[in-house]
Amino acid sequence: MVKLPIYMDNHATTPMDPRVLDAMMPFFTNQFGNAASRNHKFGWEAEEAVEEGRKQVAALIGADPREIVFTSGATESDNLAVKGAAWMYREKGDHIITCVTEHKAILDTCKHLEKEGFRITFLPVDGKGMVDLDDLCKAITAKTILVSIMTANNEVGVIQEIKQIGKIARERGVLFHTDAVQAAGKIPFNVNEMNVDLASLSAHKIYGPKGAGALYVRRRNPRVLLTPIIDGGGHERGMRSGTLNVTGIVGFGKAAQIAREELPRESAEMLRLREKLRTTLERELDEVYINGDLDKRLPGNLNMSFAYVEGESLLMGINDIAVSSGSACTSASLEPSYVLKALGVGEDLAHTSIRFGIGRFNTEEEVDYVANRVIDVVRRLRELSPLYEMAKEGIDLKSVHWATEA
Ligand SMILES: *Cc1c(COP(=O)(O)O)cnc(C)c1O
């Protein structure tokens, strides 16, 4: 028997790996020093642990440890990258390019800069969620200072052509930032191979602790400078002041090390489980739609819409499974998912979408349970749906004139 509820929302956050907790424990108790204390053993131990974490995080993305700036999480990293570059290079230009399906940490940061007088181009995506490289080329002007495009999307798992985007930006002398939160540790990601100048990472998306993140900041070819958004003691080469979160960094480092070592095996296993879930659902149910490109996608992500069911009822029916939905009433915002909207998914289908995020600790048994549960509930709801019945009888619903009450 599987243990309920089942957690299958690993894009929102991941459970911490027990090996990560073990690595962190001493730094909560005996080794509590401040990494900036230069005069005693407590400080030296903490600094040593931070530098080990820095090496481990750098190794995950093929960076030099000196290129890692620790932050409180990827929201801060995104803010530091975009605002920091915008403020630093304002003399050079006032134009930034990003994309409509970015995380709010990027979109809202760009909107903030817009109010300060920067010009922002929000590139559209196609029906599969991909940015068009011609659109990007055309958008770049002499005033463009930064391109920020995420590596993998947190809702539909779509992976952009980061290497080519980086090449385009580099050839035109424009800095390239990528929000790599969902990609790093899940798919191969190397800042040099991919021509990346700035990259945001978060520990709690890779089985590490919440409240720890990093920004990769390129040191050579080109050397990237940033205006800090937090001033103070000059930690992290002046780019991010504040006493370092030693336990968080130790945990982040350990999580990065595990992710790097296990990536080939783990990503193959995630893909196997995801494909089992997908093919089972597609075999047993008709009128299901995959949102976003199936091939250019994170191995653990499945985002699917179930036509002719009511989104609320579907979620209620599977309330022993923790997943996310593109529907309004379950999330903090009142709009259906802006990401699905950008892909051209209609409101009806957006409301019945489910994001399955398979992670390290999901088992095949759990995947089977989830598939069976979803199949049962969707079938049951459709039995009650006159629309589904009409569609099955071949009636074109668009041709039907509905009688409306006065
Ligand atoms: C989770 C997430 C963030 C925010 O990271 P925090 O560390 O929680 O602030 C940013 N971007 C993407 C793509 C994410 O999935």
Image (spheres, rainbow, N blue to C red):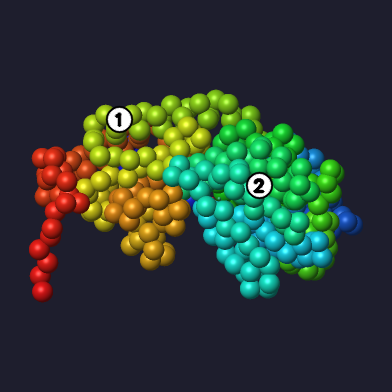
Residue corresponding to mark 2: 137
Residue 49, x across and y down, in percent: 76, 45
Q: Quarter of the image holding residue 111? A: bottom right
Against 262, is 287 above or below? below
The residue under the point 76% across, 44% down is 170
Three-letter amino acid code of the residue under disc 1: Thr
> Which of the two discs, 2 and 1, sits closer to the camera?
2
Mark toward the start of the polypeptide (2 vs 1): 2
Q: Secondary structure at mark 2?
A: helix
Residue 293 or residue 49, whichever sits in front: 293
Quarter placement of the C terminus = bottom left
Q: Is mark 1 within 8 Å of ligand 1?
A: no
Q: Nearer the viewer, residue 253 or 24?
A: 253
Q: Residue at x 52, y 52 (%)?
A: 124
- Whole-percent x and y of residue 155? 46, 48
> In what quadrant of the picture does the N terminus appear?
top left
**As drawn, 212 above or below 242:** above
Image position of 76 (left or right of 269): right
- Residue 391 found in image quarter: top left
The location of residue 249, given as percent across then percent down, is 69, 49
The residue located at (26%, 56%) in the rendering is 312
